[in-house]
Image: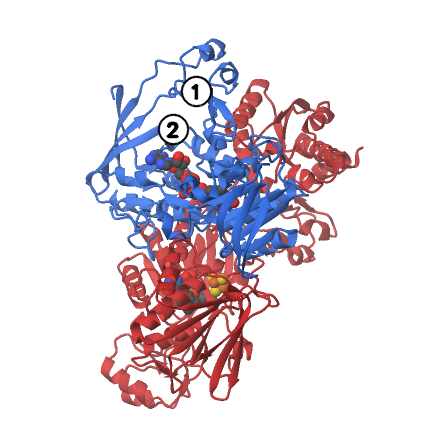
Chain colours: A red, B blue
Amino acid sequence: MNKKLGVYICHCGGNISDYVDVEQVKKAIESEEGVFLAKTTMFACSDSSQKEMVEDIKKNELDGIVVASCSPKLHLLTFRAVAERANINKYNYVHANIREQSSWAHSDDKTGATEKAVFLVKAAISKARYAESLEPIKIKSKKAVAVIGGGVAGMRAAIELSDMGCPVTLIEREPFVGGRVSQFDILFTTYETGKDLVTRLYNNLLARNNISVYTGAEVIENSGSIGDFKLTIKITPRYIMDRCNEGRLQKAIDACPVEVPDPFNFNITNRKAIYHNFPSEYPHKPVIDIENCTRCGECEKICESVDFSQKEEIIDINVGSVLMATGFDPYTPKDGEFGFNQINNVVTLPQFKRILALSNEPLIYNTRAIKHIAYIYCVGSRQVEGENKYCSRYCCTSVIHASIMAKKKFGNIFNYHFNRGIRTYGKQEVLYNESLKSGDVYLQSYEDDPPVVTQQGNKIVVTVNDILTGKKQMAVEADLVVLVTGMVPRADNSVGSLFKLPKGRDNFFNEIHMKLRPVETVIDGITISGACQGPKNILESSNSALSAATKSFSYVSKGELELEPIVAEIDKNQCTWCGACAEACPFDAIKKIKDGDKEIAMVNNSVCKGCGMCLPVCPTDVINLIAYSNREIESMIDALAGS
Amino acid sequence: MPGKIINNSFDALVIGGGIAGGEAALNIANNGFKVLIIEKDLSIGGKMILLSKVFPTLDCSACITTPKVSEISRHPGITIFTGSEVKNIAKIKENSFEAEVVRNPRYVNVDDCTGCQLCEEACPVLVPDQYQYNLVGRKAAFIPHSIASPRAAAIDIENCTLCGACEKVCPAKCIDFTQETETYHLKIKTVVLATGFNLFDPLKIPRYGFGQFKNVITSMQMERQLAPTRPFSTILRPGDGKVPDKIAYVLCTGSRDATIGNPICSQICCMYSIKQAQLLMGALPMADVTIYYINIRSFGKGFEEFYDQAKGMGVNFIKGKIGKISETDKGNLILRYEDINENIVKETEHDMVVLSVGVLPNPENSSFFPNEQLKLDPFNFVYQTDCLASPALTSIHGVFVAGTASGPMDIPDSILSAGAASSEAISYLTQKK
Ligand SMILES: Cc1cc2nc3c(=O)[nH]c(=O)nc-3n(C[C@H](O)[C@H](O)[C@H](O)COP(=O)(O)OP(=O)(O)OC[C@H]3O[C@@H](n4cnc5c(N)ncnc54)[C@H](O)[C@@H]3O)c2cc1C
Ligand SMILES: Cc1cc2nc3c(=O)[nH]c(=O)nc-3n(C[C@H](O)[C@H](O)[C@H](O)COP(=O)(O)OP(=O)(O)OC[C@H]3O[C@@H](n4cnc5c(N)ncnc54)[C@H](O)[C@@H]3O)c2cc1C
Ligand code: SF4
């Protein structure tokens, strides 16, 4: 059949037409075989252009269209919808990217850019001639979502999903939920405590009967994909029975001879191998840290609730979508970085928050009375030499807030802020103003001339060339130096690799498009939220958690999903299983199966992304990529080669 | 106001059709609910549809807004009233509100208008074009801008002389001077406030000379000059049409300044100025661009790298707050400031100045609920009653806030905030069903 095609060449309001002569492109392709009409348009994606395309298709009974505009990443769905509204199969629309691939790439060579655009459009026309109508793959989608990570983001998302009527499994790796927030006392900007917030969220979780919460739980395996994730979860026991006697347990804890640094307090205190996580401990039950426990049995002797016979449990769950909320780690300074681990009384901001929460008046740390506190900003963020180029965004506000709290709680405190330009964006500026009014001293330097911390006898001295006073060298004698550490991705983020989640330049999990699809990932069915995506404060984490909840819900709410039919298909009569394709597939979509007495490769349609990596490695050339068949690609190559 | 009275009902009422309102409406409608968007303006898309490219990815703003806008306007579950206002909303009980909405006449039959622009050509009246932020003029019969949605003509009745020229030339016969105001009595179940922000008016800082010196413009005017739907074919200074070659940015104009009543940081100006500076370096390779700042706040994902990129391209960054701007007889501008690095007061001449104006609250929010207390924060943005765990909640149960109506934020944050508001609205509708 000879197809009747319509071709639309977009100016993109100058983004394209400033460098590519779109009228010339139109002339050059007008008489290509199959082209029934060719038009240029200011914005192909605008409502009026779309309307025009629909009318053109209907009026002229076109069989297909070619749109030459920006990257299909932006508008593939837009123009597919145009085709559908005009009652033609949406796979009869073919895209040519003449913006990213032509006008923007060759803005220094207008003739060349135009010429290249002509070839790209001709290639798209050739493909459109052979394009086949396709139907989406329909799959069932299990109406349930797994939320991985029980911090603020994970808990908030779970509650919302439940309220939308969706069953949720919340999987928290630690023995307690709450994440980082449970470790902080008074929070900016509401002055609620971390404990209050976590308590509120936890009670909300418990009040809903369609949420299952697993603590001490980790996803160790995933087989399956959107609509039908099959997760295997390993649950570590607490070694404490469900109903336990508080009083006796406390005695058992006292009796435990093991002492290890307490990560809840960022290692500034020790805890026992059997321990509580006060004050924000949910579920409200101690736990035995089996890795550090020596099995001496002292606790068991005192309290009958201790139960070393509890076994690790493995459970399998089946969900339609996975919502990631695994959070962040605070940056750990290197030994010697601003005196860390070398000079006494150099601590990180998270440690300082714990010191403030745990201390009673007067403020004493390491036997030293604390009066003068120096804060060194941007430690582990905005690095000139290190890897972390980004700003961690929460820390300016957080440290100013903490320094105000220190003054309020302990009085007689003098704060010195060694910053690189304060970033209390938005309403958070109010805290900065409050701090300035209270007489805090701000000293500023650029990234290439950071402050220096030295020990001089018994004194800790911080010096800086302060740009606010014409680079005068200033020295402050401090009793405590607080390193304002940024956020980094979780040290153990292996759960990401389990799902093959992509990471950004900053090594946090990455979204598809910051503005258009901010909580979706390229792995279908998996959304991301909270600080695992990049530094965020609580408000921002909650906003993204709620957005991700809505998105995850949309994958499962209807019980059915339509997937892209552009997948690899293997000719099972000719396949002789060599495994090369399975090895080449970056998404694990190909598995070996038995077909009669023969072994062959099989593609899982809901995992395959149609990337085509398997095609060139097949020694017998029996793999076909639907919508990118040899015939289509060869015709495109011919067009590009000008033959 | 007399006119037609129409009764109707919807699940959700979204006030404001900017990116936040649009995103919220889509999310809610995609879950099977009936949504009505009330937009005051003649087009949906808010400020975003008028921007050039957006930081930090430099996506063309029109290119990412138009498909959203067209998805919204085509959605079977979404009804849009442009040129409309909410008069009042009364909460009857949970999940039940009554709203009175006024739809002002456009004097054009939108469905019939083909956007041919013949009326524009025929109209003899010329007034400043608000969509180009007064850089150029428009007619009294006009299409808001080339990517407006709906892309249909409207008659600006206040400036129209009723000469009838447009009516005569219109091939679609869609101009209709008999259109009347329509009043709608609506039953709705939940409300999303997405009324956006106002820009700081630099006339309030006379020492910067805006309105007096022609070559002092606002960042929004520069945004228009850089946009694909720009008024001129290149960057021009308005005073004499000369292509500028020494451009200055004055950050924090109307922000972080208690003396003009706005102590908070507007959160977007550093970044949009850095973005514009990069675009200017591309458009005018010989030009010199200087950004005068107090602090550069490049705090978001990819922002610090974007700032570094600008430094690498040769944008000058000078730490110092501008005290005063004066004009030379050639129309150039002399900026007086304290150079913090050198610790001296300096004066530098530029041929064009861009004031990076800040974000102010939209005062209209307080007028919607005469019988209810919609609490505002100390800066008059909509107060978020549970700003840590449920940032979209307001002081009225069942009313949610999305985007810059609750405070300054950029597009990515506005979209996430809209995601939160729609999610709360969906849960509210689901549970009260
Ligand atoms: C010192 C400091 C002070 C702060 N103060 C404030 C403040 O006052 N106000 C404010 O708004 N913000 C503050 N923040 C920011 C706040 O901590 C974050 O916004 C918030 O913790 C992000 O929540 P989240 O749920 O994304 O991540 P997290 O709190 O990190 O929670 C993630 C959870 O996921 C779990 N997890 C991780 N990996 C896995 C896995 N593989 N399987 C299962 N579970 C897993 C973790 O155990 C954890 O419970 C502060 C941050 C710091 C460092
Ligand atoms: C010069 C400049 C450049 C910028 N550049 C960028 C950038 O590069 N990247 C980025 O991320 N962000 C940028 N921004 C910020 C961006 O514009 C905002 O984040 C975004 O527009 C906020 O969207 P919104 O929907 O909340 O508000 P708005 O865009 O203000 O939309 C609000 C809508 O509500 C309507 N409305 C108002 N009141 C009523 C009422 N009473 N009844 C009915 N409707 C009403 C308005 O007409 C409008 O359509 C820039 C801002 C400026 C000023
Ligand atoms: S928020 Fe402040 S302290 Fe934290 S990295 Fe950014 S500039 Fe540095």
Residue corresponding to mark 1:
B111
| The furthest residue to the right | A643
Badge 2 and badge 1 both on one subunit: yes
Q: Nearer the viewer, residue B191 or A432?
A: A432
- Residue A373, compared with residue B389, is above or below; it is below
* Numbered label attached to residue B82: 2
Residue B92 appears in which quarter of the rendering?
top left
Which residue is pictured at 48% across the width and 82% down the height? A460
Count neighbours of disc 2 (C-alpha within 10 A) and say few if under 14, some if 14 to 19, many if 20 or more: many
Give the secondary structure at mark 1: loop
Which residue is pictured at 63% across the width and 48% down the height? A611
Of the residues shown, which amino acid type is indicated by label 1? Asp
Give the secondary structure at mark 2: loop
Q: Nearer the viewer, residue B63 or A327?
A: B63
Q: Picture coordinates of residue A424 (x, y %)?
A: 43, 58
Pointer 1 chain: B
Q: Picture coordinates of residue A229 (x, y %)?
A: 47, 55
Of the residues shown, which amino acid type is indicated by label 2? Thr
Pointer 2 chain: B
| The furthest residue to the top | B168
* Numbered label attached to residue A15: none
- Residue A28, compared with residue A466, is above or below; it is above
- Mark 2 or 1: the one toward you: 2
Which residue is pictured at 33% across the width and 45% down the height? B401
- Report the Cα–Cα distance between label 2 and label 1: 13 Å
Q: Picture coordinates of residue B82 (x, y %)?
A: 38, 28
Residue A25 appears in which quarter of the rendering?
top right
Q: Give whichever of discs 2 and 1 has the lower sequence position.
A: 2
The quarter in which the N terminus of chain B is drawn is: top left
The quarter in which the C terminus of chain B is drawn is: top left
Q: Is residue B95 left or right of residue A212?
A: left
Residue A19 appears in which quarter of the rendering?
top right
